[in-house]
Amino acid sequence: MPYDDRSLDLAFAAPGAPRLSVVLAAVSADAALSPLRRRDLVSAVRRVAAALDRAPADIPADPLWLRPRLGKIAPAALGLSQKTWTNILSDFRAALASAGATAEGRGRPAALPSEWTALRDALTLKRHRIGLSRFMRFCANLGVAPEAVNDEALAGFHAALERSELRKDPATLVRETATFWNQAGETVPGWPVGRLTVPDRRNRVALSMETFPPSFRADADAYLKRLAVADLTDPDAPPRALEPETIAFRRGQIARFASALVHRGRDPETIAGLADLVEPAAAREGLRYFLDRNGGKPSGAIHNLAALLKSIAKWGVRADPAVLDALGDLARRVAPRAAGMTPKNRDRLHQFDDEAAIGELLALPDRLVARAGRARSARAAALDVEIALAISILIHCPMRIENLRTLSLERHLSGRAGGPRRIVVPAGEVKNVKELDFPLPARVVKLLDLFLRDHRKVLNPDCGDLLFTMRRAAKPVGGGVLGQRISRAIRRETGLEINPHLFRHISAKIYLRANPGAYEVVRRLLGHSLTSSTIDVYAGFETDAATRAYAEILDQASTAPLRRRRRARR
């Protein structure tokens, strides 16, 4: 049967663990504590419960259950300093100890029921005992008998792991669990007969390119090779060369689309070349496969596949205009209907409805530099200044993470130490082929000079001319790595949830709130090609300002008759 949210949330809590409400009662009644100490411990328990956004009666006093959840909390999000939060946690642990609620959390999980203990003891391989231990605990805690284990139990286990965050990669543990369970079924006498479906690692669509004829692979290679070279004198060549990463992505798209046709029943041997993908009937069939997987709804990924088909038809196959028109119509049909940013990004932007949140973000680079001044090592100081500089650049020069991570002192930064500086990124290095040109404010120049003078080579003595590098090579730091460092620092220091791309949206929100309707300025700031694109994404950002202005007009209008009557009485 399906598992409810509460069961999944408590799936890994120690059975019989008291709730924090019990801890509160025990501490309040502990005569061995002084009144002041009793007050502090009670306060700590209540503040931890508030930080977890739950009632004390709903929180198990199980340190193993509490640890990952408390580890996620950013003190800044609670309006607390790190020192204050540390003191609260110290008093909280003392409260658990005072109430005798820590025994289950010291690496000694409660005993399994006898039926599960017998099953565990029958395992002869250590990797099976370790690999299945958490799943057995989950089943035992939720009352699932060994004979009742099925794919539904495995799905519940996966959901519980994601909630508990006991593992960074729950999917891997779930696959291992299913594999070990089935292996035990083949080797352990008396093992339950039920077998588990091992989840596909990536829910793959793409088949190996070896599935298709050599002629198809050669055709795809020739097309991708053409995309790597721009020839402005050749009317049949793409006007812009694609980056290697983009070409690799295109190769994967081709494999996915050809595989979609196979999944729809087509013999792979009949897909002899790219022309077989862009024939309108085949294009419709392949796109229908992806639409079905997405509940019949269009998406950005499906639209990108449709756009790729048109590109292949134009540059790879040299299809006639009628085919290009048909593919263009298909691409328009599968384009997402809703314009604008994703709901997740819009929700995150609501953090900045509060002026104080904007102030926290703008002040963060200076705070990190001040923290660097108190660091215990040169490396720790350099790490803080590096992230302060990255955040400062994103605030004042809203660029994509790909351009930030590859900034070069020689190619992209002009000016000299102590003087005016600019960041200029050529159009060919920018996603939408629009040059980036940002004059750096004095505060950013000061931070840049500080990093270059005192800190950059502490992190990597062989950094070459790159601003942000890997730690042991003169190569740009990975976008994911730099992005995580930025997001982690912001969350730790302010409690705000921000990814690097959100800075572009934040800059638009700040400007439009102060200047309602100024979409052309935002378009230039962000390098959009069309003002209409800017309006599609950011329409409504100035709604708060417009609503406030309208409210002021209404207030003035509503008080005008009263003022006139008062003057008449005089």
Image (spheres, helix red, strand yellow):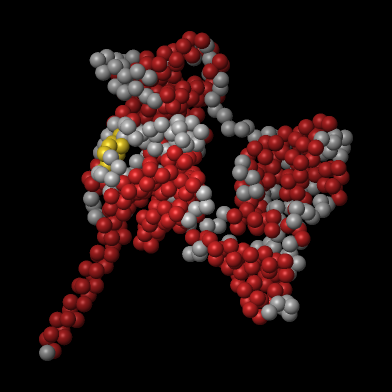
Q: Position of residue 510 (x, y in %)?
A: 31, 54
Front residue of 345/420: it is: 420
Q: Residue at x 34, y 14 (%)?
A: 318
Q: Residue at x 50, y 36 (%)?
A: 471
Front residue of 406/116: it is: 406
Q: Residue furthest bottom?
A: 570
Q: Position of residue 175 (x, y in %)?
A: 67, 36
Q: Residue at x 19, y 81 (%)?
A: 562
Residue 399, visible in the rendered structure: yes
Using the image, determine if residue 442 lies above or below residue 399.
Answer: below
Using the image, determine if residue 251 lies above or below residue 383.
Answer: above
Judge from the rendering whether residue 303 lies leftward or rightward of residue 321; answer left or right: right
Q: Position of residue 227 (x, y in %)?
A: 37, 19
Front residue of 506/35: it is: 35
Judge from the rendering whether residue 459 lies leftward or rightward of residue 3; answer left or right: left
Q: How many marks?
A: 0
Looking at the rendered image, the quarter that the C terminus falls into is bottom left
Residue 387, visible in the rendered structure: no
Front residue of 108/260: it is: 108
> Which quadrant of the view contains residue 278?
top left
Using the image, determine if residue 506 lies above or below residue 481.
Answer: below
Q: Residue at x 75, y 53 (%)?
A: 107
> Which quadrant of the view contains residue 417?
top left
